[in-house]
Image (cartoon, helix red, strand yellow):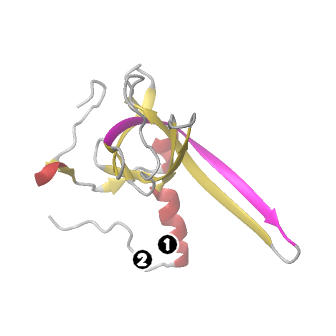
Amino acid sequence: MYPHVQKCPEYLPGGLMQLWDFVKDGELRNPTMLGPDGEECLIVVKNGTTTGITVGCATGIESFVRQYAGKDFTIHSTSMEIAVHSYSPKDEAFSVPRDSGSVVADVNGRIVGLLTGGSGITGSTDITYVSPYYFLNERVKRAFPNSHLFPIANA
């Protein structure tokens, strides 16, 4: 698939990739794959509503803490995002408007997270932000302990 990918995913009929697990925090912070420039990254893929299938490199994880104070309330919120850019400079943007909500997976068939947005010059997106699945799963499980966001289907 790409020169530095150690293992190619298995595809289902129709070209669908079976997702079987999710990438844990430690690997997101210390990726072991190599991008086209030989730098460590996590090679990711998504199928967006607007762009279709695109491949990119996840290069880091960021955490943002927000605190809002009003007259009668204080909201303390933490958000975590992974930065993703195109696999190589010759590729189009990893995402564009209306791709939000796409599941982003690594090339080994593990969920990385959900695409939440992007930034770049007008009319272009050069950085895509993905909320890590492990981070979202922890918060949903805290509120809904019996929920199963990613049940593994029996083969």
Name the chief secondary structure element in magenta.
Answer: strand
Label 1: which secondary element: helix
Residue 56 within the magenta-colored segment of the rendering: yes
Q: Nearer the viewer, residue 79 or 91?
A: 91
Q: Residues within 10 Å of mark 2 (few under 14, many from 20)?
A: few
Mark carried by residue 37: none
Label 1 sits on residue: 141
Q: Nearer the viewer, residue 49 or 15?
A: 49
| Res 21 quadrant in image | bottom left
Is residue 143 shown above or below 29?
below
Residue that sits furthest to the right in the current view: 71
The residue that appears at 17% across and 46% down in the rendered structure is 10
The residue that appears at 30% across and 41% down in the rendered structure is 107
Question: In the image, which residues are magenta?
Answer: 53-70
- The x, y position of residue 13, in whole percent, is 10, 53
- Give the quadrant of the N terminus: top left
Disc 1 marks a residue whose amino acid type is: Lys
CB contact under 8 Å: marks 1 and 2:
yes
Disc 2 marks a residue whose amino acid type is: Ser
Label 2 sits on residue: 147
- The x, y position of residue 97, in whole percent, is 47, 48
Residue 127 placement, left or right of 94: right
Determine if residue 12 is in view. no
How far is mark 1 from mark 2, CA to CA?
A: 6 Å
- The x, y position of residue 88, in whole percent, is 39, 25
Q: Nearer the viewer, residue 148 or 45?
A: 45
